[in-house]
Amino acid sequence: MYVESEGVRLAVHEHGDRSAPTVVLVHGYPDTHRVWDDVVPLLAEEFHVVTYDVRGAGASSAPRGLASYRLPVLARDLFAVIAAVSPDAPVHVVAHDWGSIQAWEAVTTPDAPIASYTSISGPCLDHVGHWLRRRPTARHLKQLLHSWYIVAFHLPFVAPLLWRHVIGPRWRSIAHRLEGVTPHVSPSIVRDGVQGIALYRANFVPRLRSPRVRRTDVPVLVVQPSRDRYVTAGVTEDVERWASDVRRHVVDAGHWVPITHAHTVARLVTDQVTAHSRPA
């Protein structure tokens, strides 16, 4: 089905029993909802599971302009999906990579209809902005070295050209060579890769330069892959400063945990949802 959000059509997929607690899975860049393909059937045995293509990816609309990809807009997309699939009860959000970054925006919005949040490899950019403002440490330097690609994404013309002619057409083999994973590549991967650059350009500099105060009382589980090449543990070291209920779990894995460790993700999510679901 499709959900409308501020003129954008979001492709939404539902699995499992709608009377069970609802779990919404949010994918990152340059993935689509299919990054969760191995996790969904495991969770759908117990829960109402929802995936969707975020704006600019897969079968969802791809509006033009950086303003269409700012974090508050992305959070409103998530709220629109939640309203459509679970209008009467809060949901449990699980998000990876850029999905996690935009889900943090939603979770730190007052009165968000979210019962729990599982964050995988994606920090709140405002939290990172405050973290970077401290006296520089080895952890800061390590994350900056891991974030070289973000600088590349801000170079005019370079990143789109690379995605159209080099990275996009070869994404499956590149991901396998770098990470040892075989991603579920969408037919729209070239468009998705080019359009998704707007996520970085619309949000990184404003949020890191002028970080806001973003707090939440939603129970948070931070899942940190120990071998993540792109998001180091340092960027989430201050989460307890902003969230009142935080648990952490380290997984011996690389960045694409939903693909390589689907059973681990499903188990962690099941525990989180069960712990924070209202009795029937």
Image (spheres, rainbow, N blue to C red):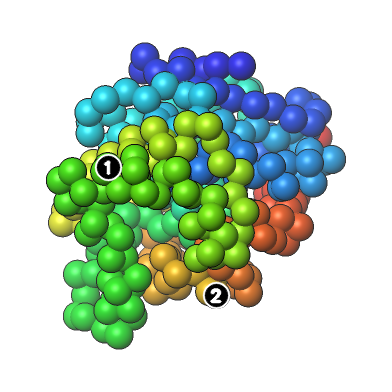
**Mark 1, other Cα within 10 Å: few <14 / some 14–19 / many ≥20:** many
Q: Which amino acid does label 2 sit on?
A: Ser
User: Tag 2, which secondary structure?
Assistant: loop
Q: Residue 76 in the image: state x and y as whole percent.
A: 40, 29
Q: What residue type is labelled 1?
A: Pro
Within the image, what quadrant is residue 40 found in? Answer: top right
Kindly identify which numbered label has been placed on residue 160: 1
Count of residue discs: 2
Q: Where is residue 146 in the image (x, y as percent from the top left)?
A: 35, 70
- In the figure, residue 169 lies in which quadrant? top left
Give neighbour class at mark 2: few <14, some 14-19, many 20+ (Cα, 10 Å): some
Q: Which of marks 2 and 1 is nearer the N terminus?
A: 1
Residue at point 47%, 31% (across, down): 188
Q: Residue at x 27, y 42 (%)?
A: 160
Query: What's the distance in space between the residues labelled 2 and 1, CA to CA?
Result: 30 Å
**Compared with residue 219, is residue 80 higher up or lower down, i.e. above or below?**
above
For this view, does 142 lie left or right of residue 129? right
Q: Name the residue under label 2.
A: 226
Residue 254, x across and y down, in percent = 56, 68
